[in-house]
Image (cartoon, grey):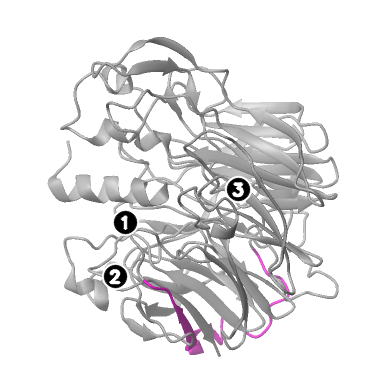
Amino acid sequence: MFGRRRLTVLIGFLALCLAGATVSAAAPAPERGHGADWPSWQKDLAGSRHNAAERKITERTAGELKLKWAFGFSKIGMFTSHSQPAIVGGTMYFGGPDGLFYALDAKTGATKWTFELRTVDPERRLPVVRNSPVVVGDRVYFGDLRGYMYALKAGTGALVWANRLDEHAQALLTSSPIHFAGRLFVGVSSNESSAAADYPCCTFRGQFVSLDAATGKVLWRHYTVPEPQAVGTWPSGATRFEPSGAAVWASPSIDPATGTVFVGTGQNYTGTKGDSDSVLALDAFTGKVRWKRQMTHPDTWRLICVDPSAPPGHCPGMENGTALDYDIGSLGNIFTVKGRTLIGIGQKSGVYHVLDARTGEFVWQRQLSKPEPNDLGQGGILWGGSYDGERLYVATNDAKPGALHALDPATGALLWKTPNPANGCAWGGSAQYPDECILANRPAVTTTPGVVYEGSADGKMRAYSARDGRVLWEYDTVREYQGVNGITARGSGVSAAGGAVVVDGMVYIHSGYHPDYGNDKGHVLLAFGL
């Protein structure tokens, strides 16, 4: 089923991952006081990923974007430059692959302060931030690959509190937190899906957590699967547990009018019980389930399913045809059509679902791509779309090729579709690696008035016309950079979960995810301006 190169790409990708009717709602309004800020991964509670306050970069001026500065990272194992920045009041906040959390001057890239994660629980491994922070007042909140949530003082980087959300050895945070009514909301995931054959698999329970933002105390927790039970042994002799998984990779969005938080869940690792491949609507204050909608069942999958050298019997999903890996890692986009509040969310099955936010009833669904089963969802929708008040914008991954789509929010009608440019692997740094280059749109989509931003695994960052999908600007990131911090770094695939951040005439992206294109240096954060 898989050639050698294809299998390497698939395993490498998951390992590194371990997202006609008139619309009554206007474009998301600029925030008062800090209209140009981008304070969280979602941009706002509704998950619009749209900066309505941006006026400098337009359909007419986007083609004039130039590199202003680069910030380099040293190469540290397989860790990648993955934490989408938050920008508030001219300061940029993000985590690096080097175990540091940074605050930079957003215009110049000059470092204001750093915080070393290893100062918290120094004996525990993987002190790396993969998710995006949320900045609220004088606090910045984020999580790491050890399962810790942190609160730092935004002005100095001083630690306010840190709390490990799950004591499971494989627990980690990839979900980016959101803040509402003095509370933080974040999903908990794990690395168990990549467990070896001799590992007692699996015991992790996916969960979604609410914390008191002032103290870090857990206020409520929703588990996505029942408590795993020993049910026998695997062919290797390791104990077998079921059910497990349904990790929450995705980042949440919130409807403040009803106090409802929405989030997607992942596939089962073992067994078939629980809220796998589901959209959850939870009461933000109590955690009570208001409704839930399971999109695919059953879907029992882990990385061993794509390894033909693995001992037989370790992937029951292969035997019964349920090894799909169609989890939901996408952000939910909340919008209103004719007074009705809807929630739209993409899935690795390639379907963008739109549901009634109050009841969970399907309103419409649109199949944008058709991935193969047991293919890491390569052809599907990964991290999330954007909504600008007129259209929904959704990207598909390696859909031969991946593409950017504009949809009518009311009906799901396809307004335009722009495939990843066919020459993406024929020029720039990725052209030297034709066996690795992929025409895949992986990051979450970002918009500003008239412009859509999406990066590609071919190493290019692009800006598109929101009106008709034309490519307005593209930049090849696969090259060497001298960072303003003195570190020489190199770009590679623009395919991390976090997309572009656009603030005050500047565009910020990370280049440094799969494919790596022979990079022997660390990855890079790039800043573009007019």
Chief secondary structure of the magenta portion: loop
Task: Measure the C-alpha gap from mark 3 to mark 2.
Answer: 38 Å
Residue type pointed to by label 3: Tyr
The CA distance from mark 1 to mark 3 is 37 Å
Vertical relation: 97 (above or below) 208: below
The CA distance from mark 1 to mark 2 is 10 Å
Few, some or many C-alpha atoms within 10 Å of disc 2 (few <14, some 14-19, many ≥20)? Answer: many
Looking at the image, residue 6 sits to the left or right of residue 55; the answer is left
Q: Inspect the magenta stretch and tell me whether residue 67 lies in it.
A: yes
N-terminal of the pair, mark 1 or mark 2, is 1
Return the residue found at the far top: 232
Q: Which span is picked out in magenta?
A: 50-74
Q: Is residue 344 visible?
A: yes
The residue lying toward the viewer, choosing from 284 and 424, is 284
Q: Which residue is mark 2?
A: 424
SS for callout 3: strand
Q: Residue at x 27, y 27 (%)?
A: 197
Q: Considering depth in this image, is 322 or 310 the residue closer to the camera?
A: 310
| Residue picked out by circle 3 | 148
**Do labels 1 and 3 touch, CB within 8 Å?**
no
The count of marks equals 3
Which mark is first along the chain, 3 or 1?
Answer: 3
Which quarter of the figure is the N terminus placed in? top left
Quadrant including the C terminus? bottom right
* Disc number placed over residue 155 in the picture, else none: none
Spot occupied by residue 31 in the image (x, y as percentages of width and height): 81, 69
What amino acid type is highlighted by mark number 2? Gly
